Image (cartoon, rainbow, N blue to C red):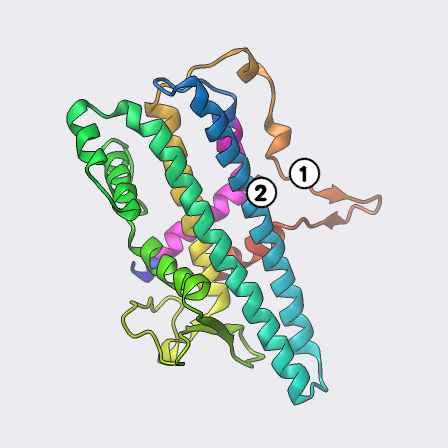
């Protein structure tokens, strides 16, 4: 994507998380609704996947806070020995690897929800086409094309290119013994996913938005953009499910659930507003918007 397209996605994500916790409003709405065509036994599966999405995103935000604090300690420590310096960067590398793992799992949950909710909407020809697909990523792409063709808005986020790149990096780390190498840069947190033979992965496309020389990646730009994409991607899918899968209101939907997703920050007796764990993401997105 072009830099201006990345910024637009980041702005959309920032608007979503400014006043509410990401991945809550849509998941709670779906969980308290009726989806046409979905079998009764599949509601529990949807419920579990939506809960898992909220839980794993909460873990991602927690880990981003850990990374922020660990890197701040590293930057502000004036008398690091070589061993301590090496320990700090290795620690940060492990934390970033965790982000790759959780991010990929969240994308898998989204696919599983789409499959349950969208398959009943396909006609016989489309269902036969879908059943004939063997690879999971191709099934995912089929469902995304269906959404893109049936949603009335800009759908440039509904493609698999960015997902495939992060999937490859995650698979290298989890299955092929690769490592996330963090460099000792106290100006910016930068890293690179390296294969076991320490050769750069030249076959993977880079994005000038977050890439530096020799394939080194800026942490804040990379993960700010990737999480912004995930938020906008998810909300686009949820909007489609809510609008086109005939979500019907029931008595439970008359209840006020806003307290479950609104960000109500603590204000002390002196009027000081205390942040919450999602601040770390909000701050990164704001920095990218204003860069």
Badge 1: few (under 14), some or many (20 or more) residues near its Cα, within 10 Å?
Answer: some
What's the residue at 49%, 36% (across, down)? Answer: 49
For this orientation, the residue located farthest to the right is 269
Q: Element at badge 1?
A: loop
In the rendered image, residue 17 lying in the magenta stretch gets the answer yes
Quadrant hosting residue 266 = top right
Which numbered dot is residue 9? Answer: none
Residue 276 in view:
yes
Q: Front-most of 211 and 282?
A: 211
198 left or right, relative to 61: left
Contact check, label 1 and label 2, Cβ < 8 Å: no
What's the residue at 28%, 37% (across, down)? Answer: 143
Pick the quarter of the image with the N terminus: bottom left
Residue 12 in view:
no
Please state the horizontal and vertical placement of residue 285, each as a whole percent of the image. 50, 56
Which numbered dot is residue 55? Answer: 2
Badge 2: few (under 14), some or many (20 or more) residues near its Cα, within 10 Å?
Answer: few
Give the magenta-colored segment's residue range. 6-28
């Amino acid at each position: 994507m072009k830099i201006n397209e990345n910024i637009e996605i980041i702005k959309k994500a920032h608007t979503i998380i400014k006043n509410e916790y990401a991945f809550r409003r849509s998941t709670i709405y779906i969980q308290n609704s009726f989806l046409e065509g979905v079998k009764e036994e599949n509601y529990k599966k949807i419920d579990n996947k939506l809960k898992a999405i909220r839980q794993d995103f909460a873990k991602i935000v927690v880990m981003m806070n850990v990374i922020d604090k660990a890197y701040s300690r590293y930057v502000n420590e004036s008398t690091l020995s070589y061993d301590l310096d090496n320990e700090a960067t290795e620690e940060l590398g492990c934390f970033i690897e965790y982000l790759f793992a959780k991010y990929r799992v969240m994308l898998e949950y989204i696919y599983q929800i789409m499959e349950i909710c969208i398959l009943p909407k396909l006609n016989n020809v489309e269902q036969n086409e879908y059943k004939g697909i063997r690879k999971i990523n191709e099934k995912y792409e089929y469902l995304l094309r269906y959404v893109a063709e049936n949603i009335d808005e800009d759908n440039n986020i509904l493609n698999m290119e960015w997902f495939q790149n992060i999937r490859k990096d995650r698979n290298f780390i989890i299955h092929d013994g690769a490592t996330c190498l963090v460099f000792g840069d106290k100006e910016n947190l930068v890293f690179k996913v390296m294969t076991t033979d320490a050769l750069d992965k030249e076959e993977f496309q880079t994005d000038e938005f977050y890439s530096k020389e020799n394939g080194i990646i800026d942490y804040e730009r990379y993960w700010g953009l990737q999480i912004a994409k995930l938020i906008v991607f998810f909300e686009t899918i949820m909007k489609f499910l809510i609008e086109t899968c005939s979500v019907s209101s029931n008595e439970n939907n008359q209840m006020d659930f806003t307290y479950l997703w609104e960000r109500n920050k603590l204000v002390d007796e002196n009027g000081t507003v205390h942040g919450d764990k999602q601040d770390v993401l909000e701050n990164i997105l704001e920095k990218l918007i204003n860069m």
